[in-house]
Image: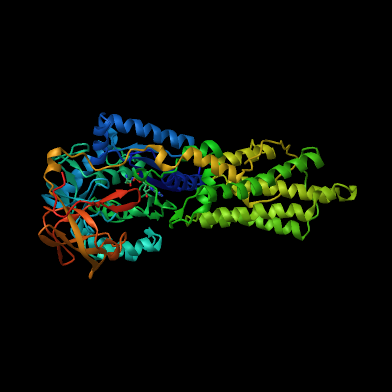
Amino acid sequence: MTEKKETYYITTPIYYPSSKLHIGHTYCTVMADAMARFKRLTGYDVRFLTGTDEHGQKIQDIAKEKNVTPQEYVDEIVDGIKDLWATMEISYDDFIRTTEPRHVERVQEIFKKIYEKGDIYKGEYEGWYCTPCESFWTETQVEDGKCPDCGRPVKKAKEEAYFFKLSKYQDRLLDLFENNPDFLQPETRRNEMIKFVKQGLDDLCISRSTFDWGIKVPIDEKHVIYVWLDALTNYITALGYPDDPELYDKYWPADIHLVGKEIVRFHTVIWPAMLMSMDLPLPKQVLGHGWLLLEGGKMSKSKGNVVDPVVLIDRYGVDALKYFLLREYTFGQDGVYTNEVMLRRMNFDLANDLGNLLSRTVAMIQKYNGGFVPDSHEENEIDLDLKTIAISAAPKVEEHMNKFEFSVALEEIWVLVRRANKYIDETTPWVLDREEADKERLDTVLHNLAESLRIVSVLIYPFMHTTSGKMRKQLGIWYTEVEWKDALVFDTMSGEQVAKGKQLFPRLDIEKELEELEKMQGPAEEQNIPLELKPEIEYDDFDKIDFRVGTIITAEKHPKADRLLVFQVKMGTETRQIISGVAEDFTPEEMTGKKVIIVANLKPRKLRGMESKGMLMFAENGKRCEIVTTIADDGCVVD
Ligand code: MSP
């Protein structure tokens, strides 16, 4: 009877097909893939799920702009995403698309279940809506008219809608965070969520009627289901819940939902509350990873500063990119991507350390022993040291992998790689070859090097399986299956015929590569990437605005808000107070005296207790926000 394996279910977020994926997205999928491969190798029955989140207003708007149907638009992008994962040899077991009938039907069943439980009611929603994020925000969450997640402007929206009784689950959620410290990691994310839940949870608006690219609410077809509710359920609809529960029964609850830090709230508050409402078990753990940033800030298509993984893969190979992503960045923290950091890692760790160790070892076995791995003989202290490091690496790698410490796990493997390189320098096989009397010693040294490399080929398998295969081919052990337990034992090799192969990783000329990459990636301005804008408006909407020219008489910091500046602005005969959230971009001194353009008929608003009547015009210029100024006289109408 075969032993029943323990199951391990790991998921990535399902990606928005609103643009091509960049290296930031691949980071999460590469981590999930390494973990899935590691768990398979260490004896688990793994299910690895990824997919795409295809509904929502944003997709509908982009499709309209491009004159195609939303389905046509997503089909093309999703093909590209699947191609990328194929190129990167991502070993997912299932790819779910939220437009697939299997998902659509199951989401409707889930909606009905929550409704029947009495946790969904009809009401009216008025709030601030951020279209790019598909998120509604309350007055207190919105900061100076901007979305608290992405910083882009939000707009007031009101609609009849269905609500989920999220507030009902507040105490159970708090209990979950407090009594289950492992549920959400890292610790900082957990603390943020405890604070968020303690502030009090509002019920959640879970339907929309202002657009229709979504799954219809089963009890009221005028509405579509809120895209996050639709998306979160993918983790169980992909397992066949509720109508075909075979996989669900086997793999749920998930062991890990791997998500970026900005979507932790959806996964640890809304998703568990939905599951609680359905009386289903909660995922065992949600892990919130950090972002890959560029030196100038977050990668974003609209800023035109994304790094395309395909360019890097074409030039350096999948394994080099995977290694870099997993080794360079600390899980949970943000990291800065630069071409130079990546090239250095590839050169030092891969070409120098690993590549050289293999090519030197194979060349020496060929030169000094006719190409066959010799047996070992009497051992000395240096041999024992190498051996101890080699056979103790696997448990250390395992320990760190179980904590998602990819970088530390790889460092442990490189301790062995570097030790083996040093071993060559210490034992000087080329000197041993000179005396017949040293033949046994030489055999032992070559044997130990081959053994160390064999163990490395097992250890790196979850991270770089192709490289592992190439190593095993050169070591003459290509016909044996990679098994984790083999990394725990030394002295298994005898008489294998080695075969010199191509360099695993060619040495890179960093200066030249930097120039080439710059040419390929191009300065952002030359890439002609269309800007990501808010939806088009009609001329009539624009015509409602009354622009005036004014002069800033005084400018000072808002006494209660660091980000706000309070201006007294003179327009013709009238002086009025206008408040703007630009204290981070401008000092009061540099604003005073400036001639500016004002939206003069904007409804007055109170901002942190002070009235603001009108709005100064600022425009986004790349990463900067710039003031719109004029040389005209005060009080002119600007057409
Ligand atoms: N569709 C939602 C997820 C729904 S899951 C039920 C979504 N999609 S996304 O495409 O915008 O983002 C997917 C993931 O990519 C997120 O976890 C996000 O954090 C991650 N990343 C996007 N840019 C990133 C970086 N620059 N760096 C690291 N991860 C980044 O959110």
- Measured as percent of width and height from the top left, residue 326 is found at 51, 50
Q: Which of 263 and 637 is in front in this view?
A: 637
- Measured as percent of width and height from the top left, residue 403 is found at 47, 57
Tell me which residue sits at (59%, 48%) in the image: 459
Q: In the rendered view, tell whether residue 33 sits above or below residue 183.
A: above
Task: Quadrant for residue 175, please give it.
Answer: bottom left
Outermost residue toward the bottom in this view: 559
How many numbered marks appear? 0
Q: In the rendered view, tell whether residue 51 sits above or below residue 400.
A: above
Along the horizontal axis of the image, is 558 left or right of 97? Answer: left
Along the horizontal axis of the image, is 433 left or right of 408? Answer: right
Task: Quadrant for residue 515, please give it.
Answer: top right
Along the horizontal axis of the image, is 279 left or right of 17? Answer: left
**Colour logic:** rainbow
**Is residue 600 visible to us here?**
yes
Task: Quadrant for residue 557, please give it.
Answer: bottom left
Outermost residue toward the right in this view: 436
**Is residue 5 visible to us here?**
no
Q: In the rendered view, tell whether residue 241 sits above or below residue 412.
A: above
The C terminus lies in which quarter of the figure? top left
Q: Nearer the viewer, residue 455 or 614?
A: 614
Tell me which residue sits at (42%, 47%) in the image: 24
- Measured as percent of width and height from the top left, residue 297 is found at 40, 53
- Measured as percent of width and height from the top left, residue 158 is found at 12, 49
Q: In the rendered view, tell whether residue 308 sits above or below residue 198.
A: above
Q: Which of 246 and 77 is in front in this view?
A: 77
Q: Which of 414 and 220 is in front in this view?
A: 414
